[in-house]
Each structure stands twice: as C-alpha cells, then as structure tokens.
Image (cartoon, rainbow, N blue to C red):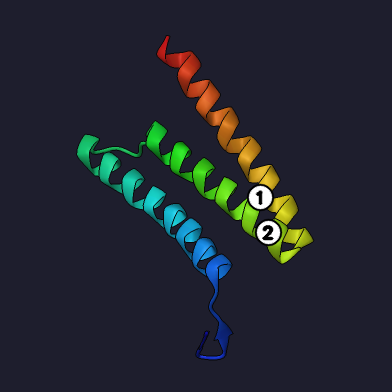
C-alpha cells in the first residue's frame, strides 16, 4: 500500500510503533516530572526507550540501514546502563 508516496507495509508500521514508544517515553518523563515538580527521569522512561530500540533494531536489520543499525546498538547500551544504575541505587 502507498500513502503520500511512501510504501506502507508491516515493517513500516513496526517502525512507527517503535517511534511512538520513543515519543511515549517523553510523555511519561514529562508527566512524572510535573508530578514531583522537578526534572525527573523515571525507570519507565528507560524501559520504554530500550523496548523501542529493540523494536527499531529488528526494523533496521530488515531495512539494511547501517547508520541506523550502529545508532540503535549504541542507544540500547546507554539505556541498559541507566536501568542498571537505577536498579543498583534502589538497593
């Protein structure tokens, strides 16, 4: 299917959902920050980012985009590290 000259298939929808999760992470961060009235990065922010990166990684493998491939791997490492640090500080 085509929409405005763009091919729409399963992987396009998959990539759009992944990008939607990235956007949702910002909404969650904004909501939680407003709730505590200070800038705050909740653990949900990092989990949403990691899930979106994993989804995008599979998208990138199918689409064969080297630049996006490298960026997605590096982002995922950062997200996993932040989750690890937050878990360590909870103990």
Q: Which mark is residue 72?
A: 1
Indicate the quadrant where residue 40 lies: top left
- Judged from this view, the residue extending furthest toward the right is 66
In the displayed structure, 15 sits above or below 9; it is: above
- Judged from this view, the residue extending furthest toward the bottom is 5
| Closer to viewer: mark 2 or mark 1 | 2
> Does dot 1 land on a helix, a strand or a loop?
helix
Report how many numbered discs are placed on residues in the image: 2
Q: How far across and how far down the image is residue 19, in percent?
A: 49, 60
Q: Residue at x 51, y 49 (%)?
A: 52
In the displayed structure, 12 sits above or below 33; it is: below
In the displayed structure, 13 sits above or below 26; it is: below
* Mark 2 vs 1, N-terminal side: 2
| CA gap, disc 2 and disc 1 | 8 Å
| Left or right: 91 as drawn, with respect to 65 | left
Asked if the residues shown at circle 2 and circle 1 are in contact, with their CB atoms under 8 angstroms apart, the answer is: yes
Q: Residue at x 57, y 48 (%)?
A: 53
Q: Residue at x 41, y 40 (%)?
A: 45
Q: Which mark is residue 39?
A: none
Q: Residue at x 44, y 43 (%)?
A: 48
> Does dot 2 land on a helix, a strand or a loop?
helix
Q: Which residue is mark 2?
A: 60
Q: How far across and how far down the image is residue 58, in percent?
A: 64, 53
Q: How far across and how far down the image is residue 17, in percent?
A: 45, 60
Q: Tag 2: Cα neighbours inside 10 Å, few (<14), some, or many (≥20)?
A: some
| Left or right: 61 as drawn, with respect to 15 | right
């Amino acid at each position: 299917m085509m929409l405005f000259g763009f091919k729409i298939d399963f992987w396009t929808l998959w990539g759009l959902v992944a990008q939607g999760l990235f956007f949702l992470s910002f909404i969650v961060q904004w909501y939680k920050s407003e709730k505590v009235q200070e800038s705050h990065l909740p653990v949900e922010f990092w989990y949403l980012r990691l899930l979106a990166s994993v989804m995008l990684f599979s998208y990138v493998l199918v689409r064969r985009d080297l630049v996006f491939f490298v960026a997605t791997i590096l982002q995922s490492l950062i997200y996993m590290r932040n989750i690890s640090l937050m878990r360590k500080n909870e103990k």
